[in-house]
Image: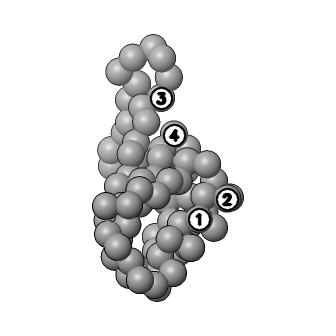
Amino acid sequence: MSIFSISDTESSGPTLISVVIPARNAASTLDATLWSVRHQTYAHWEVIVVDDGSSDATVDVVTRHQGEDARIRCVKG
């Protein structure tokens, strides 16, 4: 039994979970973060990474994950 459950409040389908990840020079941790979200058992989610002017490979990490999963996107903050 789960500690919590996500119930459908409308007949249109499962509830979409939006995960917003603020990131600035987060390349060293972002890969594991995105991998973790992508491997959840609940499949109806989206990830929005808000890049705050990173000078490292943060955007490259997001771009790689975007190529593997269309539910991930990056916006520049």
Q: Can residue 36 be seen in the rendering of this structure? A: no
Separation of marks 4 and 3 at Cα, in angstroms: 7 Å
- Which is more N-terminal, label 3 or label 1? 3
Q: Which residue is mark 1?
A: 63
Separation of marks 2 and 3 at Cα, in angstroms: 24 Å
Numbered tag placed on residue 44 in the rendering: 4
The residue lying toward the viewer, choosing from 44 and 2, is: 44
Q: Are marks 4 and 1 in contact (CB under 8 Å)?
A: no
Q: Which picture quadrant has residue 15? A: top left
Q: Are marks 4 and 3 in contact (CB under 8 Å)?
A: yes
- Which is more N-terminal, label 1 or label 4? 4
Q: Are marks 2 and 4 in contact (CB under 8 Å)?
A: no
In the image, which is nearer the foreground, mark 2 or mark 4?
A: 2
Q: Are marks 2 and 1 in contact (CB under 8 Å)?
A: yes
- Which is more N-terminal, label 3 or label 2? 3
Q: Secondary structure at mark 4?
A: loop
Task: Give percent across and percent down for residue 38.
Answer: 56, 58
The residue drawn where x is 55% and y is 48% is 71
Task: Give percent across and percent down for residue 3.
Answer: 33, 49
Separation of marks 2 and 1 at Cα, in angstroms: 6 Å
Separation of marks 1 and 3 at Cα, in angstroms: 27 Å
- Name the kind of residue labelled 2 in the image: Gly
- Name the kind of residue labelled 4 in the image: His
Sort mark 2 into few (<14), some (14-19) or many (20+) by Cα contacts within 10 Å.
few
Q: Which residue is mark 3?
A: 14
Q: Can residue 7 be seen in the rendering of this structure? A: yes
Residue at the outermost top position: 11
Q: Which residue is mark 2?
A: 67
Q: Is residue 24 left or right of residue 37?
A: left
Separation of marks 4 and 1 at Cα, in angstroms: 20 Å
Q: Is residue 52 left or right of residue 61?
A: left
